[in-house]
């Protein structure tokens, strides 16, 4: 049996919401799955991702292959980086404490970057919004639009 980590679509038409699941590669997209690892909502800015890192890491170590989109999600959440660091520990390149220190440093920098993106998106959204009680300005026309 070949296990895949993939997205399972939920949500209504044109409002996607996904579960991140481990499933048999022969199972249908929205069908039977082995374990639910988290959720992914692409409609928020930036996309909202809830993921159990430990479960995802366990399945990757067992040999489950992620789809392209899930690979991007796992990379964004740091699961692939953590797997990389733990492989280095297994090879004896550095100890477990050093690996966790590197991961926590990366995680802190990543969280700050995500926070900046959220604030920037919020500022842009507020700038596009017209103040309440004011009508948007119209371009001036030459003769007022009447016949002349």
Image (cartoon, grey):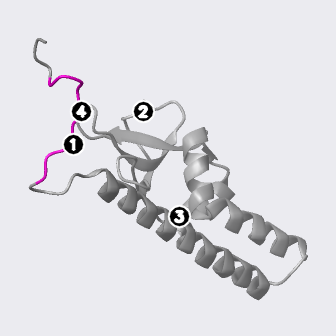
Residue 35 at what x, y percent from top left?
44, 53
Q: Secondary structure at mark 3?
A: helix
Q: Secondary structure at mark 2?
A: loop
In the picture, measured across the screen, residue 126 lies left or right of residue 72, that is left
User: Which residue is more in the foreground, 61 or 20?
Assistant: 20
Residue 98 at what x, y percent from top left?
78, 85
Disc 2/disc 3 C-alpha distance (Å): 20 Å
Residue 143 inside the magenta-drawn segment: yes
Please tell me whether the stretch drawn in magenta is mainly helix, strand or loop. Answer: loop
Tag shown at residue 140: 4
**Which circle, 1 or 2, is nearer the viewer?**
1
Residue under the image location 32 percent in, 39 percent down = 16
Tag shown at residue 137: 1
Q: Which residue is mark 2?
A: 29
Q: Is residue 102 above or below residue 3?
A: below
Residue 135 at what x, y percent from top left?
14, 46
Residues at discs 2 and 3 in contact (Cβ within 8 Å): no
Q: Which residue is mark 3?
A: 55
Determine which quarter of the picture holds residue 108. Answer: bottom right
Disc 1/disc 2 C-alpha distance (Å): 49 Å
Give the residues in magenta. 134-144
Disc 2/disc 4 C-alpha distance (Å): 55 Å
Residue 19 visible in this rendered orientation of the protein: yes
Residue count near mark 4 (Cα–Cα under 10 Å), binned few <14, some 14–19, many ≥20: few
**Which circle, 4 or 3, is nearer the viewer?**
4
Q: Secondary structure at mark 4?
A: loop
Residue 80 at what x, y percent from top left?
67, 59
Of labels 1 and 3, earlier in sequence is 3
Residue under the image location 90 percent in, 77 percent down = 92
Q: Secondary structure at mark 1?
A: loop
Disc 1/disc 4 C-alpha distance (Å): 9 Å
């Amino acid at each position: 049996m070949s296990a895949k980590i993939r997205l399972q679509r939920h949500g209504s038409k044109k409002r996607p919401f996904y579960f991140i699941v481990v499933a048999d590669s022969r199972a249908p997209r929205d069908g039977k799955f082995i374990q639910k690892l988290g959720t992914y909502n692409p409609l928020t800015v930036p996309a909202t991702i809830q993921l159990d890192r430990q479960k995802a890491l366990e399945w990757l170590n067992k040999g489950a292959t992620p789809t392209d989109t899930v690979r991007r999600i796992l990379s964004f959440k740091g699961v692939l980086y953590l797997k990389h660091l733990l492989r280095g520990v297994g090879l004896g390149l550095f100890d477990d404490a050093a690996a966790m220190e590197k991961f926590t440093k990366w995680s802190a920098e990543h969280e700050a970057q995500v926070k900046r993106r959220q604030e920037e998106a919020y500022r842009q959204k507020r700038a596009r919004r017209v103040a309440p009680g004011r009508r948007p300005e119209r371009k001036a026309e030459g003769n007022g639009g009447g016949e002349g």
